[in-house]
Image: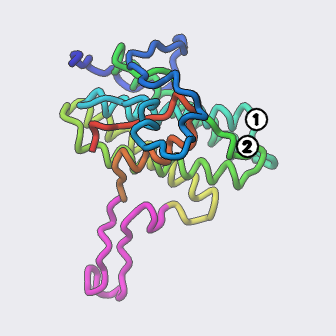
Amino acid sequence: MSKLLPPPEPATQPTSHSTSRRSFLRYTGASMAVGGLLLAGCDDDNENDNRIDVGSGDNGVLNYAYALEQLETAFYAAVKGGAYYAGASAAEKQIFDDLSLHEQAHTNFLKAALSTNAIKQLEADFSTINFADKTSVLTAARSFEDLGVAAYNGAGRFITSAVYLVAAGKIVSVEARHAALIRDLISYNKFVDNDVVNLFIPTDPSVPGGPGNEGTGLERSKRPAEVLNTANQFLKEGSKLSANSLV
């Protein structure tokens, strides 16, 4: 296994290096025609042959995070590139500008930490998102941010380096702030809900922790396979992912 390089401090602004990427992963079955993949009897193994596996160990976790950050970065670039959705206020535009900078900084940080172990630049497919419509954009943003938080929390168990574990904790903290902000834009005072946090809901306010208060107050996490099942819906063929070693 390639030796991990110590990560630099996360940047507060995106760096201006080239966006070109070299892929160090082998694609198997890449020449298989798409029509052949859709034939009756085609199994999941053949479908997965065309996927980019993020790898194993700390490199695998970093590539997993790097892939998700690429997706978020591409999404916010598309939001801005479409001149924002109809009726976007100056405050909303500023929020998306800030989120875009954060995600680009995360992407740059992870790419630098991975160095030559990084997977290639992924190609997003946002054809199901209407970037001119506020509801469509905010719903997609909530999905991406919630997915990122659940992904980092679910993958932390695979990190062996204390340095990378601390870095992941710092990144997921920012992602959680993003998620809360987007949720509040969708519906005021709904910055957190039971679908993302195992909420503590008291049945008797005078008895904290009493009977019926089973909620832990902890964020709900997701394993890589579940996360990538969602993320792959927004990636083009040739950029879809697997995490066969992170189970």
**Mark 1, residues whose alpha carbon is within 10 Å: few (<14), some, or many (≥20)?**
few
Q: Amino acid at mark 1?
A: Gly
Quarter that holds the N terminus:
top left
Q: CB under 8 Å between callouts 2 and 1?
A: yes
Q: Is residue 188 magenta?
A: no
The front one of 1 and 90 is: 1
User: In the figure, 162 relative to 177: above or below?
Assistant: above
Which callout, 2 or 1, points at the residue further toward the start of the chain?
Answer: 1
Residue found 36% across the figure and 86% down from its top: 203
Compared across the picture, whether 191 is left or right of 196 comes to right
User: Is the magenta region chiefly helix, strand or loop?
Assistant: loop
Residue drawn where x is 46% and y is 65% of the image = 195
Q: Specify the label residue 10 is tagged with.
A: none
Which corner quadrant of the image does residue 163 belong to? top left
Residue type at the position of mark 2: Phe
Residue 91, position as x, y percentages in the image: 69, 45
- Indicate the position of residue 14 as horizontal and vertical percent values: 52, 22
Judge whether 51 appears above or below 156 on screen: above
Q: Is residue 86 above or below residue 197?
A: above
Asked if residue 135 is positioned above or below residue 39 in the image, the reply reads below
Q: Is residue 211 magenta?
A: yes
Which residue is located at x 48 percent, y 42 percent? 42
217 sits to left or right of 15: left
Residue at x-position 27% and y-position 44%: 247
Q: Which residue is mark 2?
A: 131
Instruction: Give the residue at mark 1.
Output: 82
- Which segment is the magenta one? 192-219
Secondary structure of the residue carrying numbered label 1: loop
Please state which of residues 120 and 62 is positioned toward the viewer in this rendering: 120
